[in-house]
Amino acid sequence: MKLVVVGDALLDVDVEGTVERLCPDAPAPVLDVVGEHARAGGAALAATMAARDGVDVMLVSALSEDSVGERVRSLIDVPLVFGRADSIPVKTRLRCGGTSLARVDRGGAAGAPRVTDDMLDVVLSADFVLASDYGRGLLRDERLRSVLTRVPVVWDPHPRGPAPVPGVRLATPNLPEATAFSGTADPDAAASELLSRWGARAVVVTMGSKGALLHCGGTPVAVPAPAVPVADPCGAGDRFAVAAAVRLAGGAAPDDAVADAVGAAAEFLARGGVSGMRAPLSSTVDSVRRRGGTVVATGGCFDVLHPGHVRMLAAARALGDCLVVCLNSDLSVRRLKGEGRPVNGQDERVEVLRALESVDDVVVFGEDTPEHVLGRLRPDIWVKGGDYTAELLPETAVVRRWGGRTVVVPYHRGHSTTEILSRRA
């Protein structure tokens, strides 16, 4: 079974720290940051959940051509077909002890995302579709909506988004969303109204700890939720929608699919929600840490690999038990080096680096500097090659947050990509 998740991708960032004092000028807590965790959110989070269930899944979305878009793309670990978006929303939660203190939102206010023929073809090829709407405009596209009437769909709506296309197998609003769409806060009345208004085969109103109410046109079915401790409810709606879509795609009746989805959402919350989903940035790093080893990291473009690179990487690897290279993405290199660069694309650069005996893993990042990827990787040693003083490098302050240190290894003059390319121009 091939599931296609189509909808808006976001960038979710959790900034975590400790609070031990208040601001001197206001009764506001001071968050001392100890780490940052980023993930692809929205429809991309739903696709990730499906993939971790072992489902054959593809994501259809829209990404921007900037550092945020590059970062989201680097965090997506499922097959992706995408069009252009002017910008992508970034939702940053400030957290302490498993609790959100505040959320800062930015970006996303721009023109409608562009839908390509390739995106439409992928949707049409699906055995089942999950439409994951986050109100950013992708699911308003008329060509996409036309295609979605020709495949079986579970629609997870958003108050700022459009109504589901007619004929969806199941629409999954939560109670505030159902209230906004129907004008009534009564779950039974809201489900009945939306079933008729949307022309859906079934509507389920999810109600958190109170379970869910399913309406298929006859007597509504109430599905209770298991009692679980909830520290972080983020992502529970996506977990519900994914589980319901997968069960319906497998031939389950709507009431069975909803009951299983309520159970899946409860289990997801019991395991810590999105915090419990975090996987190590590198399995190599995780393995080395478990046995008490030293993780070394370095970074750069590594566009045209030359002896200077090879010597620097060998020196870095000698400092610990594994070496991870943080590699600038293609768009990042272009911003740093100008048009015509990189000479070699990121997939080629990754392949060449991984072939070196000194390199244990490669992680691609989309920003101009590696601060974010360092916050996720948390190396014991950060290595820079060149004529630098460690104290002057911005990465030094970053790695100090978790007790890491910065080391500068010798720079080999006469070996640089720029010099090589200038000699051949």
Image (spheres, grey):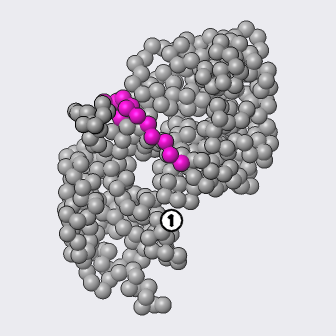
Residue 145 in sight here:
yes
Q: Which residue position is annotated with label 1?
A: 331
Q: Is residue 170 above or below residue 139?
A: above
Q: Which of the 4 image quarters holds residue 387?
A: bottom left
Q: Position of residue 226 (x, y in %)?
A: 48, 14
Residue drawn at point x = 55 percent, y = 28 percent:
237
Residue 123 position, x and y percent, is 71, 45
Pinpoint residue 143: horizontal percent, then vertical percent. Answer: 78, 47
Image mark count? 1
Q: Residue at x 30, y 63 (%)?
A: 298
Q: Is residue 48 left or right of residue 195?
A: left
Q: Which residues are magenta?
A: 95-107
Pick the residue in front: 334 or 289.
Answer: 334
Q: Residue at x 74, y 55 (%)?
A: 117
181 left or right of 376?
A: right
Asked if residue 126 shows in the view, the reply is: no
Q: Position of residue 20 (x, y in %)?
A: 22, 33
Q: Secondary structure at mark 1?
A: helix
Q: Which amino acid, by three-letter code, is at mark 1?
A: Leu
Give the camera-side residue of 163 and 129: 163
Q: Is residue 96 above or below residue 407?
A: above
Q: Quadrant of the N terminus?
A: top right
Magenta stretch, main secondary structure class? strand
Q: Tell me which residue sits at (44%, 36%) in the image.
A: 103
Front residue of 212/157: it is 157
For this view, does 22 lie left or right of residue 241? left
Position above or below: 59 against 264? below
Residue 102 in magenta? yes
Q: Residue furthest top?
A: 219
